[in-house]
Image (tube, rainbow, N blue to C red):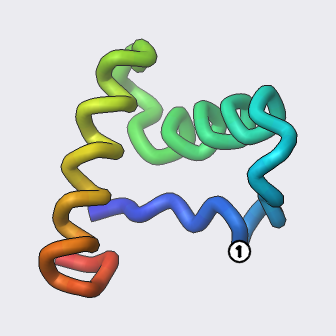
Amino acid sequence: MFIYPHKAVFGWDGVDVKKFQQDHRHAWNQTVKDKKLIDETLLVVELFELVEVAETGSGTS
């Protein structure tokens, strides 16, 4: 499973939301190049990953 390392990769400080969104979409597009992504798709996958990390304490499956 792909866990997007926001702060580690892009140094996101929690302030520049537009940059965060652009970086985030770019990272997902690189991960699933052959699929068309929409905001709702990203949201569902990211929520699943947040729950997994919270439950297991790790970012890998």
Q: Which picture quadrant has residue 38? A: top left
Residue 3 percent across, percent down from the top left = 41, 63
Going by the numbered disc 1, the residue's amino acid type is Ala
Tell me: residue 28, above or below residue 2: above
Residue 47 percent across, percent down from the top left = 28, 44
For image coordinates 33% across by 17% down, the residue present is 40
Q: Which picture quadrant has residue 36? A: top left
Q: In the image as oriented, which residue stretches furthest toward the front?
A: 15
In-image side of 18 versus 53 (left or right): right
Q: Which picture quadrant has residue 20? A: top right
Residue 16 percent across, percent down from the top left = 85, 39
In which quadrant is the C terminus drawn? bottom left
Category of crowding for the residue at label 1, using alpha-carbon neighbours closer than 10 angstroms: few (below 14), some (14–19), many (at least 20): few
In-image side of 61 versus 58 (left or right): left
Front-most of residues 61 and 52? 52
For image coordinates 33% across by 77% down, the residue present is 59
Tell me: residue 49, above or below residue 9: above
Front-most of residues 32 and 37? 37
Residue 25 percent across, percent down from the top left = 59, 32
Instruction: Return the residue at label 1.
Output: 8
For image coordinates 20% across by 59% down, the residue present is 51
In-image side of 58 versus 3 (left or right): left
Callout 1: SS: helix
